[in-house]
Amino acid sequence: RRSSICSPLQCYKESGYPEHGPGVNFSDCDTTVFPNTCEVTCSPGFIGNSTRLTCGTTGAFEGNAPTCGRMPCSVPAGLTVSSLTHNCNGKVQGEECFVECARGYSGSPPEIYRCLFGALNGNSLTCTGTRCETNIPTGPGVNATPCSGTTTAETCMPTCQVGYRSEEHTSELQ
């Protein structure tokens, strides 16, 4: 007497996954056998709805892979200060952007930030206002000493020398 043992077919990635774009994760399907299903998800750094594939009668997967898009990165508050300038708006997974001291500020050299898993990553910059050399208040009776050492985005209030009357105003130095 002879007995037969039948075992289910294993679906292999070599038999072909459904057509798919970047960021699709088939790792749950590595050991799927007929007639079971497996979940296909988006890889880290990508977003989209997961789908299920069925291991078919021929050992090939049946069904559709998810459509996975690159995860966007929001610009952190630390890059939105007036002392910095950047081109990081709208960056998505794997893209880079450039951050540097804004005009009128100096300090750290420019840095490249990279969008990874929804966060922009890069080294912090330290940028300080440069000393104002132009538009310093002048004129008869003007005492500009309070404006000495003023830097970008700061204001100063010049005073009047003895014998002159004050007409108050704030001077924006550059």
Image (cartoon, rainbow, N blue to C red):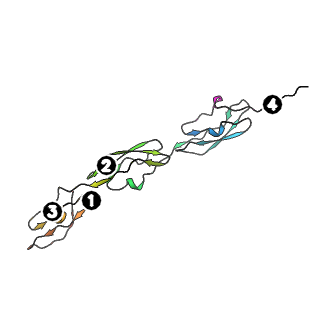
Percent position of residue 22, x then y: 54, 37
The amino acid type of the residue labelled 4 equals Cys
Q: Is disc 1 placed on a helix, strand or loop?
A: loop
The amino acid type of the residue labelled 3 equals Pro
Asked if the residues shown at circle 1 and circle 2 are in contact, with their CB atoms under 8 angstroms apart, the answer is: no
Q: In the image, is residue 152 above or below residue 18?
A: below
* Front disc: 2 or 3: 2
Please state, as top left, top right, bottom left or bottom right, where the C terminus lies in the image.
bottom left
Give the Cα distance between marks 1 and 4.
Answer: 80 Å
Mark 1 highlights which residue? Answer: 153
Q: Residue at x 33, y 45 (%)?
A: 110
Q: Which residues are magenta?
A: 1-22
Percent position of residue 82, x then y: 32, 56
Instruction: Of the two numbered discs 4 and 3 on the same chain, state the one appearing first in sequence.
Output: 4
Mark 3 highlights which residue? Answer: 137
Inspect the magenta stretch and tell me whether residue 173 lies in it: no
Instruction: Of the two numbered discs 1 and 4 on the same chain, state the one appearing first in sequence.
Output: 4
Q: In the image, is residue 89 above or below residue 164?
A: above
Mark 2 highlights which residue? Answer: 108
Q: Is residue 81 left or right of residue 42?
A: left
